[in-house]
Amino acid sequence: MRKEMILMAVLASILIVLLFLLAGAASSGKGDDALVAYPENYREWFHVKSMVIQEGHPLYDPFGGLHHIYANKLALRAMEEGKPYPDGAVLIFDLLEVKSGDDAIVEGSRKLVGAMQKDSKRFAETGGWGFEGFRGDTKERMVSDPKNACFACHQSQKGSDYVFSQYRN
Amino acid sequence: MRKEMILMAVLASILIVLLFLLAGAASSGKGDDALVAYPENYREWFHVKSMVIQEGHPLYDPFGGLHHIYANKLALRAMEEGKPYPDGAVLIFDLLEVKSGDDAIVEGSRKLVGAMQKDSKRFAETGGWGFEGFRGDTKERMVSDPKNACFACHQSQKGSDYVFSQYRN
C-alpha cells in the first residue's frame, strides 16, 4: 500500500512537471510568435537619423514630435550595404514629445517606441517584418492590426525592403 | 678615398633619419598636445539627445540647425552616474543643416562636428576640457581660440563639469 502511494506521488509529480512544461511551451510558442520582442537596450544601438513631424503633417496624429531611428548591428550592416535585411534585424522609431519656444525645439517625454523586427517566416504576411509600438516608457503594446496600422504605409518602400530610412554617415 | 665616401654617405643617412625623427617628435609633441584629436567613429557612440536651434536663437549664428550629442563610453558612464568626467571622456556636438517644409524638419548636410575632450593636464586652462570644431565632413579645424569661442559659454555649466547635456533614457 505504501509502495503504491509513493508510486502515485511520483507519477503525480511527473504529471505536474509535464503540465508546467506544456504551459511554458504554449506561452512562448504560437501565441508569442506573432509578437515583436521588446527591444531591450535599443538606446545603445546605432543612431541612424532623426526627424521632426509638425502639426499639419499627414502623420502628425500618430507620429507628431521628434523621432530618432536606431538600428541593431544586423540592421545597420544591411542598411550600410543597401542589401535586404536578414532575420534578426531590428529598427527602432523612438518618438519623443517636443517643446518648442525661444527659437528652439527640445526633447520632451517619450510618446512611443516603434519596432520593426525581421523574421521572414513568422511575419511573412507583412513583408517579413513584424511591427509593434510600445507606449511611452512602458512595454504596453499598442498595435493590434500591424497589417493595416503599419505595413500599409511601409509597403510603399518595397524597393528598400519596406524600410523608410537610408544610411547616412 | 672610397672608404671615406662610404663613411660620409652613412653619416649623411644617419643625419637624415635623425632629422625625420626630430620633425616627427615636434609634430606629435608640444604642438599637437594642445589639439583635440579628431573623434574617429563617433557616429557609433551613444546618442545622448538632440535639439533644433532656429533662427532668432542667440546661438543661431554658429549653431543653427539640428544637432545630435554623442558620448564615448567614458563620457557616458560619467554622465549616467552624474560624476565628473574622467580623462579620455569625449562628447560630440554633431550639427546638421535642416530642411524645413511640408510640416516637417529633416536632416541636411553636416555643418560641423564639435568635440570636447577631457584631459585635465593638457587643457587645465579651460576646465580640463579641450574644445574643437571640424568643418562639415572634413577634419579641417575651426577653433583658434577655444577659451573665448567655447569655454566662455561652457563655464556656466561648472556644476556639471562644464557639460550642458544631461543623461536621459
Image: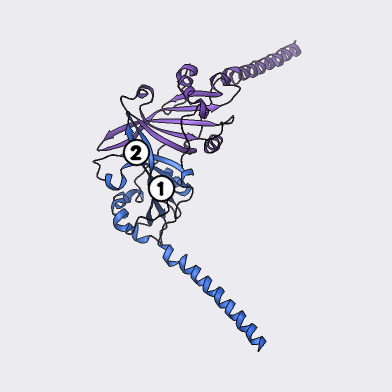
Chain colours: A blue, B purple
Residue B38 seen in the figure: no
Assign a secondary structure to mark 2.
Answer: strand
The x, y position of residue A63, in whole percent, is 31, 45
Residue located beneath label 2 in the image:
A98
Assign a secondary structure to mark 1.
Answer: strand
Q: Are marks 2 and 1 in contact (CB under 8 Å)?
A: no
Camera-side residue of A83 and A150: A150
Looking at the rendered structure, which numbered label has been put on residue B161?
Answer: none
Q: Amino acid at mark 2?
A: Val
Q: Nearer the viewer, residue B74 or A20?
A: A20
User: Residue B75 appears in which quarter of the rendering?
Assistant: top right
Disc 2: CA contacts within 10 A as few (<14), some (14-19) or many (>=20)? many
Q: Residue visible at 24% across and 45% down?
A: A58
User: Toward the viewer: B121 or A89?
Assistant: B121
Q: Is residue B49 above or below residue B10?
A: below
Q: Which residue lies under the disc numbered 1?
A: A92
**Chain under numbered label 2:** A
Instruction: Tell me residue B52's x, y (percent).
Output: 36, 32
Q: Which of the two marks, 2 or 1, is nearer to us in this view?
A: 2
Q: Earlier in the sequence, mark 2 or mark 1?
A: 1
* Crowd tier of the residue under label 1, counting other residues whose Cα lies within 10 Å: few below 14, some 14–19, many 20 or above: many
**Residue A89 drawn at (x, y percent):** 44, 51
Do the residues at discs 2 and 1 belong to one chain?
yes
Pinpoint the chain carrying mark 1. Answer: A
Total of numbered circles in the picture? Answer: 2
Circle 1: residue type = Ile
